[in-house]
Amino acid sequence: MPLSMAAGIMAAGGAVLGSLTGSGLAMNEWLLALAGAAFFAIATLLFAKTGWSRGRCGIGTGVLLLLIGLLSVGLAFGLLAGIIGYLAGRIGHWLESGDYRTHLPPYLTSREVAWHYGFRILCGVIFFFLIAPIVVIIPLSFNAENFFTFTPGMLALDPAAYSLKHYEDFFGNSQWQQALRNSLSIAPMATLLSVSFGTLAAIGLSQKHVPFRRAIMAVLISPMIVPLIISAAGMYFFYSRIGLQGTYWGVVLAHAALGIPFVIITVTATLVGFDESLTRASANMGAGPVRTFFKVQMPLILPGVISGGLFAFITSFDEVVVVLFVGSAGQKTLPWQMFTGLREQISPTILAVATLLVAISIALLATLELLRRRSERLRGMSPG
């Protein structure tokens, strides 16, 4: 790639980073955008003339931005700027040297190469804007002040600016602990019902002789499609007539109804590769339907069942709209308490709770990925 084009691309990236920095620090966005564009363009040109390796270009750019960040804002911002500068320096050298075409077929045109990397950049930007609001919460939960923003002390990495008091408030506050106990008593029971009914429904709908399979499947997975506010309102009026409104079992059944579609979908996907000759062989050996299910089918579809159960648990544990309609003060769950904290008192403890929920969600998603890989290995497929 021509040096001028590489410098232009880096200037565009620097302008975007400068604008985001100005927005985050409440400074002049246009001025920082121009400064960022000029810095990255000049750095790319200078380091290209020196003939440095990619690693040395990254270190040089990173050190410069580290010093600028330290002098202008503080240690935390300087470290972040240094990391960005290191990556930008390597990318600039990668573009200028033409290494970006090394792993691509030589017959690709410039437009095809641009689409190849442009598509990946677009996916990366979308991922960044999806994950950034979640990541920002984590350091804020250690704020020593009752603020929802980064303090100067936090940006300077001052130990006095960080504290565990929000976590101490969560574990020591009776309202938060009662909400946690309610969630831990409702979610497992709702998950158990979802897994039981969802697995049976998936196995039944996988049989080709079942009439109206598509229509039944559409009805069973409709809670995933219908807006929650509509489902919640419908459950409220229905439960009011049968005496389940404001009861523990009312909330459990409502959450189970929301979790069943996830179990049906995951178990149905597992049953796609299931060999029906195994059940026929079990019947020929004299095993009944129940014994066949637990000894033959369940071990093979277990990864899908557990995956569906984890999705159902997450759905129940994080759900707030339905429980506001069908629950009462005695069933105030953790999300309900968080909603109350945002609406009435703006409690910073919400940040600590949100961080814990993010950690739990990451652990569950990692478990789901391991189960997915195990399921594919059992079916003789490549985990990739």
Image: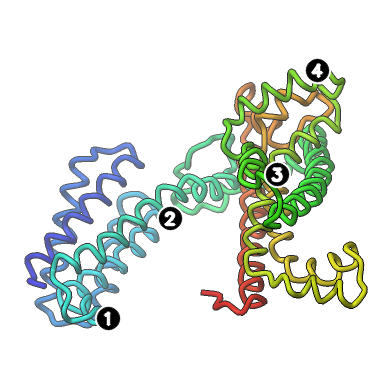
Decide: few, some or many residues near mark 3? Use Cα within 10 Å; few <14, some 14-19, many ≥20. Answer: many
Q: Are marks 2 and 4 in contact (CB under 8 Å)?
A: no
The residue under label 3 is which amino acid type?
Gly
- Picture coordinates of residue 355, whole percent (x, y): 62, 48
Pointer 4 residue: 240
Left or right, 152 with respect to 105, comes to: right
Left or right, 6 with respect to 14, comes to: left
- Picture coordinates of residue 377, whole percent (x, y): 63, 77
Pointer 1 residue: 103
Residue mark closest to the camera, 3 vs 2: 3
- Picture coordinates of residue 215, whole percent (x, y): 62, 41
Q: Secondary structure at mark 3?
A: helix
Q: Are marks 3 and 1 in contact (CB under 8 Å)?
A: no
Task: Please name whichever residue, 231 or 345, is drawn nearer the observer in this view of the structure.
Answer: 231
Tell which circle, 4 or 1, labels the residue nearer the N-terminal end. Answer: 1
The residue under label 2 is which amino acid type?
Ala
Q: Are marks 3 and 2 in contact (CB under 8 Å)?
A: no
Q: Secondary structure at mark 2?
A: helix
**Real-space Cα separation, disc 3 to disc 2, in angstroms:** 42 Å
Decide: few, some or many residues near mark 4? Use Cα within 10 Å; few <14, some 14-19, many ≥20. Answer: some
The residue under label 4 is which amino acid type?
Ser
Residue mark closest to the camera, 4 vs 1: 4
Pointer 2 residue: 76
Pointer 3 residue: 259
Tell which circle, 1 or 2, labels the residue nearer the N-terminal end. Answer: 2
In which quadrant of the rendered view does residue 321 lie? Answer: top right
